[in-house]
Image (cartoon, rainbow, N blue to C red):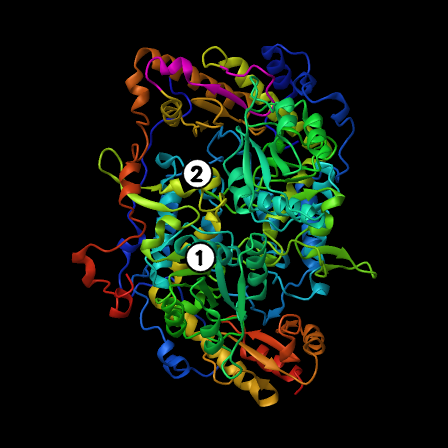
C-alpha cells in the first residue's frame, strides 16, 4: 500500500529554446552614462556578429519554465533520501540566508585584506572547528569537492615522501572503496594495490601487513567503511603503515557516523578530507557545488596548498603565500567560500551537544531500518552498523528482481532510491543511509514501502521490474543515449527560419 | 536541537524496538581508547537569530557598498533577482546528482539547456555539465588534450591567469609533464606568436591561451590555432570573463574551450563557488571529463534526459577514468542558465557592449593621466594602467572614498613596474570612474 504519495497533475514544459521568439526580452539595462561606442571600431574583426540560438524569452516565461522543471525533481525537502554514502541531510535555510549577506556574498576575492577581515575570520573559525572535530592539527579549505580533496591529500602524501627523497610508487585501496579513490591515486601518478576485504567486509590487517613495504606511499581508507562498519583494527592498520613509513589517508565521506563520538586524528589518520556537502549540510544542489577541506597532521603542514591563513603581528588575519614546500595551488582564490559560511552556520546551530546528538540519531536511524528489514532483505555482513546499512538482493533475485528494480519501485512509493550496486564487495547491494534528518514516522513509511515491495517481488515480480509506474517519464533508454549521444539541442530543420544562425557559427558545428 | 525530528520518547521507543538499552551500544565497535568522552570544543548551540547576528557582524567587517574596479578572474555584474528566487526552490537546492532520471528531469533538462547555450556561445559542438571552476577546468582541459594526442608537453601563455597557471602546475608537475611558458607582445599584450612558434614542437599536446587574457587583451585565436595545429597540438582557450562572448567573436578555431561562467549570474562570494565548464569539438567527447547530459526517450517514446557516457567516469572506470572528478557545480550552472535566459540573444550583446563602452571610457580617462599599457590591444572590459607611484598608495586613497581600485600586478608581472589591472563593468558609474581616475597620480 502506497501511503506516502498520491499522484497529482504536473505541467508539461518544452525546452526554453522552443519558447524563444525574436524581440521577447527579460531584461532592461539602465541608460549608458558614458559615450556610446561602436564595437566594430574597437574590436574590428574580433567583433561577434550574432549569438545564434541563444533564447529570447520574457521574465514570466523564465519563472514558469524553471518552476515547472523544479517540480519534476525529487528533493530532501520532499522526503527521505536514503542514499548510502551520500549523507542527504536537511539543508537549513538560515545557511542560505547568511551566505547571501551583502558583505559576504558580494565580496571580491582580491579586495584588500583590511576590508576582508570578516571573510577571513569565517575561514579561521571554520578551520578551527573542523580541526577540533577531526582531531587534526591543521587544514586547508581550498579543495572544491571531495574528490578534489582526495587529490590534494594524496599530493600532500607525495610531497612528504619526496621531501624524504622518494615519492614512492603505490597506494593501497580496499576493494570496498568509492571509485574516486583509485581514480585519484592514478591521477597523482600512483600505482593502485587493491586490498581484498575479509569475510566481515573489513580491512584484513594481517593481509595488509604482508603487502606494505617501502614502495607503498600510503593507504586510502574509508572509515566507517562503505558497509557502514567501523574498522575496529584501525590503529593496527595505522601502525602497519607507519612502521614502513607509509601514511594513512581517510576518506571522510562517512564522517556523519563519527562527529562528536571519535576523532580520526586520535585513531592514527594522517590526512583526510571532509565533504561539507555531506556531513556539514551544505546543499547538494542537483550535483554540486561541494567543498572538500583537507585536514592533516603537523608533519604535512608545510606542504599545504598556498595560500594558508595566517594571523599578522597586529592581530589582523591575512594570507601567507610564501610557502616554498607547498604542493602549490589546487584552485584559484581560496575555495568554495560560500560553502564555508553554510557549514559554519550548521556547526553553530548544533553546538557540541547537537553535533553529538546528530551522529547518534543518524546511527539510531540506520540501525532501526536494519532491525526492521533484516530477514526481509539479506544482510550479508552482520557486524554492527553505524550510520548506514547494506543489504543484498539475494532473496529477491530468486524471483528475477534486482536491487536496481527495487530501487526504481521505491520511487512509486514516494522515496528516492537508496544507493544501488555499491559497494562492489556486496553483489546486488542496497546501501541505505537515512541520516539524522528523518523522523520515526518517515522511517516507518520507508520500512513499510520496502516490506511492501518485498511482498510484490513474491506476488508480482513484473510490477517491480517494470517500475517506476507513476513518474513523469518511465525508465529511459540509456543505451541509445550513450550510443548516439545528443548532448545539445538543435532546431528541427523546419524551425530554422525563426532562429537562423549566421554562417560564421554554422561552420563550427 | 531544532533540525532533529525526534522526541526523546521516539528515541526510547526506537531503541526498545531494536532491542538495545542505550545508544552507546552502537558505538561499541569503536575501540574504547578512541571514544571521545567529552564535548567537542566548538561554539555552543546558537539560536537562529544569534547565527544571523554573528554573520552580520562578519559581513560588516568585509567590504559592503564599495564600488569595485577589480576583475582578474572574478567579475562584478548585476544579478537579476529571479536567479536566487529560482535556485532556492527546494527541488533544485536540495536534490541529489540526477542519477535517477525518472525523478530528476528538472535538473537534467536545465543542464541540457546549459550545455546547449555554452555550445552556442563558445562555438563548440559539445559542453559538459560543469567543472569546479575556470582554474581546475583549464587543468583538466590540458589533461584531456594529452589523452587525445598521446603527448605530455604543454605550452602555456604567461597571459593566462597567474592562479590558473599555478593550479595547472600543481596538476602536471608531479607527474613529470613538462610545461613551457610563453611571453607576450609588449605592444598588444597578446601572446608572443614568435615565441610560441619556437615553443611548440612535435611533442606538444596543447597550447593554452586565455582570451580576453589576463591583461584584458583579446588574443588572435586563429593565428595561435594555426601554430598549434601545424605541429599536431590542440588549442585550448580559457575564458575567464564569460560576458566577453556577448560581443567578442567566439574561439571557434579552438579544440577545447575552458570557460569560467561566474560572470553569468554567480555572486563574487569571495572567490567561490563558481562554475567552470569545458566545451570541445565533438570528436573529443569520449575524452571529456565530468558529467554529460544527453537526450533520449523513455520506454513509451517520451523525450527525456539522462546522465550519459558515464563509462568515462570514476564510479564506473575507477583508476582508468578520464578524471577523478565526481561533484560538479550543478546549482551554480543553474544560476548561469537562468542568467543566460534573462539576457538572451540580444541582452548579452547589449550588456557586453555597455561593458565595452565603460571600459573604453575609463581607459581613455586613465590615459590622460597615466600610461595605459599595450596600446595596440583590442580589449573587452579590462586594461592595465601603469603609474609612477605604487598602485597600493592610490588604492588606499580610493578605499577612503569607498572605491576598490585595480589589481596590482607587481607580484605576478614585476617587469611591468607600478602597474594595475582595472576592470569596468556595467556596475561602474561614470562618477566612480572619474573619482578613481582622479585618485591615481601620474
The span picked out in magenta is A379-401
Between the C-alphas of marks 1 and 2, the distance is: 22 Å
Q: Is residue B287 magenta?
A: no
Residue A7 % position (x, y): 33, 29
- Give the residue at x 71% y 63%: A113
Q: Nearer the viewer, residue A384 or B403?
A: A384
Residue at the left extreme, as displayed: A494
Q: Which mark is residue B151?
A: 1
Picture quadrant where residue A490 is located: bottom left
Q: Secondary structure at mark 1?
A: loop
Q: Is residue A122 above or below residue A297?
A: below
Residue B346 % position (x, y): 34, 68
Picture quarter with the N terminus of chain A: top left
Q: Is residue A395 magenta?
A: yes
Give the chain letter at badge 2: B
Q: Which residue is mark 2?
A: B317
Give the chain letter at badge 1: B
Residue A245 % position (x, y): 71, 38
Q: Nearer the viewer, residue A492 or B433?
A: A492
Q: Is residue A161 above or below residue B393?
A: above
Q: Earlier in the sequence, mark 1 or mark 2?
A: 1
Q: Is residue A493 visible?
A: yes
Residue A341 % position (x, y): 63, 48
Amino acid at each position: 500500500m502506497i501511503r506516502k504519495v498520491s499522484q497529482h497533475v504536473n505541467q508539461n514544459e518544452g525546452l526554453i529554446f522552443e519558447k524563444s521568439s525574436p524581440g521577447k526580452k527579460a531584461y532592461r539595462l539602465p541608460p549608458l552614462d558614458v559615450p556610446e561606442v561602436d564595437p566594430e571600431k574597437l574590436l574590428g574583426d574580433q567583433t561577434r556578429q550574432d549569438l545564434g540560438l541563444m533564447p529570447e524569452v520574457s521574465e514570466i516565461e523564465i519563472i514558469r519554465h524553471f518552476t515547472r522543471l523544479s517540480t519534476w525533481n525529487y528533493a530532501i525537502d520532499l522526503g527521505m533520501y536514503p542514499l548510502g554514502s551520500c549523507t542527504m541531510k536537511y539543508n537549513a535555510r538560515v545557511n542560505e540566508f547568511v551566505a547571501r549577506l551583502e558583505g559576504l556574498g558580494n565580496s571580491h576575492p582580491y579586495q584588500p585584506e583590511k576590508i576582508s577581515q570578516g571573510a577571513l575570520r569565517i575561514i579561521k573559525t571554520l578551520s578551527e572547528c573542523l580541526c577540533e572535530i577531526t582531531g587534526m592539527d591543521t587544514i586547508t579549505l581550498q579543495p572544491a569537492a571531495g574528490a578534489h580533496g582526495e587529490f590534494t591529500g594524496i599530493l600532500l602524501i607525495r610531497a612528504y615522501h619526496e621531501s624524504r627523497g622518494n615519492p614512492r610508487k603505490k597506494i593501497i585501496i580496499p576493494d570496498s572503496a568509492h571509485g574516486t579513490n583509485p581514480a585519484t591515486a592514478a591521477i597523482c601518478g600512483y600505482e593502485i594495490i587493491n586490498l581484498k576485504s575479509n569475510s566481515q567486509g573489513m580491512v584484513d590487517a594481517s593481509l595488509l601487513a604482508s603487502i606494505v613495504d617501502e614502495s607503498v606511499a600510503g593507504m586510502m581508507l574509508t572509515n566507517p567503511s562503505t558497509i557502514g562498519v567501523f574498522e575496529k583494527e584501525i590503529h593496527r592498520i595505522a601502525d602497519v603503515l607507519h612502521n614502513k613509513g607509509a601514511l594513512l589517508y581517510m576518506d571522510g565521506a562517512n564522517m556523519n557516523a563519527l562527529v562528536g563520538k571519535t576523532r580520526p586524528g586520535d585513531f592514527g589518520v594522517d590526512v583526510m578530507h571532509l565533504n561539507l556537502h555531506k556531513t556539514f549540510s551544505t546543499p547538494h544542489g542537483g550535483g554540486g557545488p561541494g567543498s572538500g577541506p583537507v585536514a592533516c597532521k603537523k608533519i604535512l603542514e608545510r606542504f599545504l596548498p598556498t595560500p594558508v591563513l595566517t594571523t599578522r603581528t597586529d592581530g589582523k588575519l591575512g594570507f601567507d603565500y610564501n610557502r616554498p614546500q607547498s604542493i602549490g595551488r589546487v584552485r584559484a582564490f581560496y575555495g568554495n567560500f560560500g560553502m564555508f559560511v553554510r557549514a559554519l552556520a550548521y556547526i553553530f546551530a548544533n553546538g557540541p551537544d547537537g553535533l553529538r546528538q546528530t551522529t547518534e540519531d543518524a546511527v539510531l536511524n540506520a540501525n532501526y531500518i536494519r532491525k526492521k528489514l533484516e530477514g526481509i532483505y539479506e544482510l550479508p555482513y552482520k557486524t554492527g552498523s553505524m550510520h548506514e546499512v547494506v543489504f543484498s538482493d539475494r532473496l529477491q533475485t530468486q524471483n528475477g528482481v534486482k536491487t536496481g528494480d527495487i530501487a526504481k519501485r521505491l520511487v512509486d512509493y514516494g522515496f528516492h532510491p537508496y544507493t544501488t550496486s555499491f559497494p562492489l564487495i556486496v553483489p546486488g547491494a542496497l546501501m541505505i543511509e537515512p541520516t539524522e534528518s528523518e523522523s520515526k514516522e518517515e522511517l516507518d513509511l520507508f520500512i513499510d514501502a520496502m516490506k511492501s515491495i518485498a511482498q510484490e517481488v513474491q506476488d508480482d515480480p513484473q510490477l517491480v521490474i517494470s517500475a517506476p509506474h507513476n513518474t513523469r517519464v518511465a525508465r529511459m533508454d540509456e543505451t541509445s543515449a550513450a550510443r548516439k549521444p545528443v548532448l545539445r539541442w538543435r532546431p528541427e530543420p523546419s524551425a530554422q527560419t525563426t532562429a537562423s544562425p549566421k554562417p560564421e557559427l554554422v561552420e563550427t558545428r | 536541537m531544532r533540525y532533529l525530528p525526534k522526541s526523546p520518547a521516539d528515541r526510547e521507543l526506537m531503541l526498545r524496538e531494536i532491542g538495545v538499552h542505550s545508544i552507546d551500544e552502537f558505538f561499541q565497535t569503536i575501540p574504547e581508547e578512541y571514544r571521545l568522552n567529552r564535548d567537542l570544543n566548538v561554539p555552543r548551540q546558537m539560536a537562529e537569530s544569534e547565527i544571523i547576528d554573528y554573520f552580520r557582524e562578519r559581513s560588516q567587517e568585509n567590504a559592503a557598498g564599495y564600488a569595485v574596479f577589480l576583475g582578474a578572474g572574478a567579475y562584478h555584474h548585476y544579478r537579476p533577482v529571479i536567479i536566487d528566487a529560482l535556485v532556492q526552490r527546494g527541488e533544485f537546492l536540495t536534490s541529489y546528482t540526477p542519477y535517477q532520471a525518472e525523478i530528476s528531469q528538472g535538473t537534467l533538462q536545465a543542464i541540457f539547456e546549459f550545455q546547449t547555450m555554452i555550445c552556442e556561445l563558445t562555438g563548440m559542438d559539445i559542453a559538459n555539465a560543469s567543472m569546479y571552476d575556470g582554474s581546475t577546468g583549464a587543468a583538466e582541459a590540458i589533461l584531456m588534450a594529452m589523452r587525445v594526442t598521446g603527448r605530455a608537453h604543454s605550452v602555456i601563455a604567461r597571459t593566462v591567469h597567474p592562479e590558473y597557471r599555478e593550479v595547472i602546475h600543481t596538476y602536471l608537475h608531479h607527474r613529470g609533464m613538462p610545461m613551457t611558458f610563453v611571453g607576450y607582445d609588449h605592444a598588444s599584450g597578446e601572446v608572443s606568436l614568435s615565441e610560441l612558434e619556437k615553443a611548440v614542437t612535435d611533442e606538444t599536446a596543447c597550447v593554452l591561451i586565455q582570451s580576453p587574457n589576463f591583461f584584458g587583451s583579446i588574443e588572435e585565436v586563429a593565428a595561435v590555432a594555426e601554430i598549434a595545429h601545424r605541429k599536431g597540438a590542440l588549442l585550448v582557450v580559457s575564458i575567464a570573463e564569460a560576458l566577453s562572448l556577448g560581443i567578442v567573436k567566439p574561439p571557434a578555431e579552438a579544440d577545447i574551450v575552458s570557460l569560467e561562467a561566474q560572470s553569468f549570474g554567480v555572486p563574487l562570494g569571495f572567490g567561490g563557488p563558481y562554475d567552470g565548464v569545458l566545451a570541445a569539438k565533438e570528436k573529443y567527447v569520449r575524452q571529456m571529463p565530468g558529467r554529460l547530459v544527453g537526450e533520449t526517450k523513455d520506454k513509451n517514446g517520451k523525450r527525456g534526459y539522462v546522465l550519459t557516457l558515464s563509462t568515462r567516469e570514476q564510479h564506473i572506470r575507477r583508476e582508468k577514468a578520464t578524471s577523478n572528478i565526481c561533484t560538479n557545480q550543478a546549482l551554480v550552472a543553474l544560476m548561469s542558465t537562468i542568467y543566460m535566459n534573462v539576457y538572451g540573444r540580444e541582452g548579452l550583446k547589449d550588456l557586453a557592449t555597455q561593458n565595452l563602452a565603460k571600459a573604453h571610457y575609463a581607459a581613455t580617462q586613465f590615459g590622460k593621466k597615466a600610461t595605459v599599457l599595450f596600446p595596440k590591444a583590442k580589449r573587452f572590459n579590462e586594461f592595465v594602467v601603469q603609474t609612477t607611484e605604487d598602485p597600493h598608495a592610490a588604492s588606499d586613497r580610493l578605499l577612503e572614498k569607498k572605491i576598490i581600485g585595480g589589481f596590482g600586478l607587481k607580484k605576478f608581472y614585476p617587469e611591468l613596474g607600478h602597474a594595475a589591472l582595472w576592470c569596468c563593468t556595467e556596475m561602474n558609474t561614470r562618477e566612480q570612474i572619474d573619482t578613481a581616475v582622479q585618485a591615481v597620480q601620474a
